[in-house]
Structure formats: structure tokens, C-alpha cells
Image (spheres, rainbow, N blue to C red):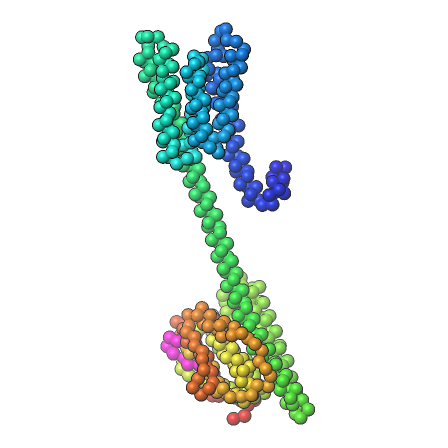
Amino acid sequence: MHYLLVAVLTTGSTEAVADRLRRLRFHRVDLIILPVVFLADVLVFSRMLRIEGATAAERVAIVIYSGAGIGLLLLRWRAPVAVYIAAVVLALPPLLISDYYIPFLIPLVALAAVAQLRPPRVSLWCLAASVLPIALLVGKAVLQASPSGRLPSAAGSAVFYSAGFVLAWGLGQWIGRNQRRLEQIRVQHELEVREQQKLAENAVSVERLRIARELHDIVAHSVTIMVLHAAGARRVVRTDPDRAAESLTTIEESGQQAMTELRRLLALLRESDDGPDRVDAMVPGLAHVDQILAQVRNSGVRVTLEISGQPARLDASVDLAAYRLIQEGITNVTKHCGTGAQVAVTVEWGAEKVTVAVEDDGLGVRSAAPAGGGGHGLAGLRERIAIAAGEFSAGPTESGGFRVAARLPVSTGSPIPPPAKASRPVEEHLGVDR
């Protein structure tokens, strides 16, 4: 725990600490392997400790020599090939000049590290190079055998030492393959985690964009209506106080409706886990178009609503897209044309598509300079319609006006009855005389 705390304080990253701990555990295997190799090398493969008459200096020398080989093995994780070559070279003097020490285990451990950490082609070359120490080991065994037992000794020694090098190479290959497989699993897991994080970030970005569109549609429309009516009230406050009072009432109603819309949006964000029925019930649609039209009352903009065809059911996203198109279209007219403009809102129901359009005549006088929108309204509409699998169009008309329209898919459910007086103009709802 103390090591973990110090590592976190020094690195500042738990991932770096985990990687350091993995490397630490990886080298802890030497705490078991190397002492066992050292003891076996000295006690089993060295006869100097068991022969009578051996001096203390000779015993110390062989222990030091074996310890040097063990110290060399500590470096095999960083440079396995170089350590293997050095281990073979280190084994040559005892094989050539000593009859009491057989340096066999240290080259085996070094070869296993090469097979574990390096490609098979490299480790096979090192395995082939083991012919030299094997030949010296066999030759030493033959020299130590009696004349009658030299052939069996040579054959047995060749099989034993060759099998030792091959088994060490095979063990290293097996450990290396398992480690590489585990590393691939770890990397794949990290990639999957990153992909999930990326998907989550994209989902957050999409949600932020959706909220931004909703805020734009809510605030831009309401603020535009409030600005226009405030300008109109200021112009007639002395000559026509009643009309100014009506404009102030409209401003108040627009502000209240904007607050209601914002509360709905916040509730939608907070209560999105209540299921689709709860969400769909809070989303406005074509059934709420009259609320949009009522907000331009006394602004001097003539608005007509024409509905044709058999109304059908729409998905919540499609219904909201149609509603926002009408809202944005009327907002743009009141912002850019102002008093005296005439707007035609049409909803044409078809068997598979519903066409929603807002078209103005381009006439009118602005009571106040429009706020710069930067074109984000139309861009947001285009994206919203595309998400709803619809077709969007916007552009000037031959009469000098502007038309915004969209063709949206109709749901496969049964049609709904048309509302009363659906095809009649709604100018009476706006307080505008014919």
C-alpha cells in the first residue's frame, strides 16, 4: 500500500502505477527461478563441492563463477540475445579447462528468454547455435568416461543436453505465445473501452446539439415576437395606449410560453428514463401550431393556415420537426419582414408523406432591426429534417418572398380524424382583419 501511494504521488496516474506494478510482478519471477538455478548449478552440475581435497578457494571460485552467470541472467529481459551469447561464452572456459563444473543451466535459462521475447526466426538461430556448447558438453562427457563407455556416454550426453536446449526453447515459445495472446486481449479490451468512450462522447455531443436546437427554436421565436411587440408598443404608447397594452400582454404571454417550453425541455432531460410515452407526451407537434400563430397577434403579420388531405399519425421526432419548421419559418418572417407581411402556412397530407411549408410574400416593414442569427436556424432545421428522414428546401420565391418547406414520412398507423375547421384561414385567431 505504501508503494502504491508513493507511485501515485510521483506519477500522478493510476494507469502508470498499474503498468509499473505489472512490470514489477513480471520480474518477481526471478526471485524464484534464479535462486533455484543457482543452487542447482552449484550443487548438481558442479562436482567441486563434493570432491575431497578441494580447497576453499576453488569452492569459492566456482560459487562466484556461477553467481556471475546468475547476475548475467538478470539482464535477459532487456537484451535476451546478447545475454544468451554472453552465457555461452561464459560457459566455454569451464568446459575447456575444468573437469569439475558443467555450466549447463545458465545457457538454458538464457535461451528460454530468447524464445519468449524474440521472434521464432531469431530464437531458432540461437537454438541452432547451441550446437557449440552441446558439442563441448558431449566431448567433456566422453573424456571423463572410460574407454569402453565412451560411445554410450556420448549418445546419452548428446540426447540429454540436446533435449535440455530444445525443451528450454519450447518452454520459452509457449510462455511467449501466452503472453502475446494476453497482451492482444488487453489491447483489444483497451480499444473497446476507447470505442465505448468515443460512442459515449458522440452521444453527449448529439444530445448537446439537440438541446441547442431546442433552445434556439424556443428562445429565438419568443424573443423575436417580444422584440417586435415591444417596438410596436413603444411606437403607439402615446397615440394608442390600448394597442400598446395589447402588445405588452403579448410580450408577457410570449415570455410565459417561453418559460413553459424551457421547463418542458428541462423536465424532458431530467425525466428521460420514464419511457417513450412520457417523452412523446411532452414533445410539441402539429397539434400545437395554433399556439405559434397566436403569438404573432397584433404584430401586423397576416397568417393563414391551410390543411389538406387526411391527417395521419406521425412519429414524435417527425411531429416535432414539422412543428419547429413552422415555428422557425414564422419567426424568420416576423424578424426579417415585419408589419404588413403575409404568411401562408400549408400542411398537405399524403399517403406516405406530409408536406409542411411556410411562405411569405416578402412585403412588410420591420419595426426593429432583426437580431443576427447567423443562419443557424435554417441550418438546424435542415439537420433536424434530415434526422427525421425528410427532405428540406428553403429559398426565395418568384414573387420576392421566401419559402421554407419539408416533406416528412408518415407513420404506418391508422389515420386520425381532421380537426374542425382545418381548412379555414386562422386570421381570426391572430386578430388580423381581412
Extreme residue toward the right, this view: 238
Residue at left offset 40%, top offset 27%: 168
Can residue 184 be seen from the camera position used here?
yes
Q: Is residue 24 above or below residue 224?
A: above
Where is residue 305 shown, x and y percent of the image?
Answer: 48, 85
Residue 374 appears left or right of 314: right
- Residue 347 part of the magenta segment: yes
Q: Is residue 88 above or below residue 346?
A: above
Q: Is residue 281 visible?
A: no
Frontmost residue, 395 versus 316: 395
Left or right: 374, with 81 as reference point:
right
- Asked which quadrant contains residue 299, the reply is bottom right
Taking the spot 57% from the left edge, 86% from the top edge, the residue there is 366
Is residue 321 in the magenta section? no
Q: Most prominent secondary structure in the magenta stretch? A: strand
| Residue 72, horizontal then vertical, whole percent | 49, 26
Q: Quadrant of residue 228?
A: bottom right
Quadrant of the rendering where the N terminus is positioned: top right
